[in-house]
Image (cartoon, rainbow, N blue to C red):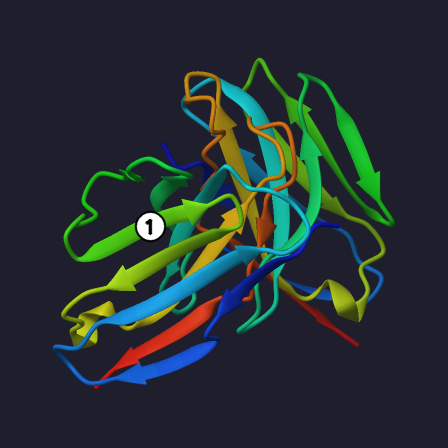
Amino acid sequence: GAVVSQHPSRVICKSGTSVKIECRSLDFQATTMFWYRQFPKKSLMLMATSNEGSKATYEQGVEKDKFLINHASLTLSTLTVTSAHPEDSSFYICSARDRAGGNTEAFFGQGTRLTVV
Amino acid sequence: QQPVQSPQAVILREGEDAVINCSSSKALYSVHWYRQKHGEAPVFLMILLKGGEQKGHDKISASFNEKKQQSSLYLTASQLSYSGTYFCGTVLMTTDSWGKLQFGAGTQVVVTP
């Protein structure tokens, strides 16, 4: 199956700093990528839909200015957590499809565990 | 818009069967099932697209009742490797063409020897 690579896998940052997480589709072009957040023993909460060359679409309740998403190419989307605070600590995970629509498998990255101290 | 999953958790002995249910209050285009091990990314199991469709993957199978907007995942003759948290993800009929996948709360499955 297709491969989605996410980097870094773990990051610890100080409160007030920004952290960038990268999501790459390695062997296919992903016009759309999705960003999720997962708290311990909880479900994956969709944060935003990232579209190549256009603004991301955020889910209700997700702060656009705090979670900046850039989808600069067909193989790369980035999530930047700005001015991070301890409550932003979580498992962030991206996914992508190699075709548009909801009838195909979504490939997930390995996830990034963010700890804000 | 998130689907509702039940039960929250199930403990099985190796060889036993279990059923995990997923339901939506809105019309569904597709249902996706994933399994996640602790600290890892979700692993794809299967997609169900049409009402009444059934699929199987080894001894894990699923059904999709489009009319009832429900899907069930069947773990048959469970193996130790089946342990993990199972998530159903749904794509709504009314969703945009991107096919946003919304996940249920998950069902923790523990298979014991």
Badge 1 is on which residue?
A70
A80 is higher (above) or lower (below) than A95: below
Query: How many numbered discs?
Result: 1
Residue depicted at 68% across the width and 51% down the height: A27
Horizontal placement of A62 versus B18: left or right?
left
Is residue B103 among the parts visible in the rendering?
no
Residue depicted at 56% across the width and 28% down the height: A100
Q: Secondary structure at mark 1?
A: strand
Image location (x, y in percent) of residue A70? 33, 50
Residue depicted at 71% across the width and 40% down the height: B46
Q: How would you rate the neighbour count of disc 1 (Cα within 10 Å): few for under 14, some for 14-19, many for 20 or more?
A: some
Image location (x, y in percent) of residue B59? 85, 49
Horizontal placement of A114 versus B18: left or right?
left
A104 is higher (above) or lower (below) than B5: above
Image location (x, y in percent) of residue A116? 24, 80
Residue depicted at 78% across the width and 70% down the height: B80
User: Which quadrant of the figure has residue A4?
Assistant: bottom right
Name the outermost residue toward the top: B67
Judging depth in this view, the residue of B113 and A34 nearest the camera is A34
Horizontal placement of A68 versus B56: left or right?
left
B47 is higher (above) or lower (below) than A90: above
User: Which quadrant of the figure has residue B108?
Assistant: bottom right
Quarter holding the C terminus of chain A is bottom left
Judging depth in this view, the residue of A100 and A41 nearest the camera is A100
Image location (x, y in percent) of residue A80? 28, 62
Is residue B58 among the parts visible in the rendering?
yes
Check the residue under mark 1 and report the chain it is in. A
Q: Amino acid at mark 1?
A: Asn
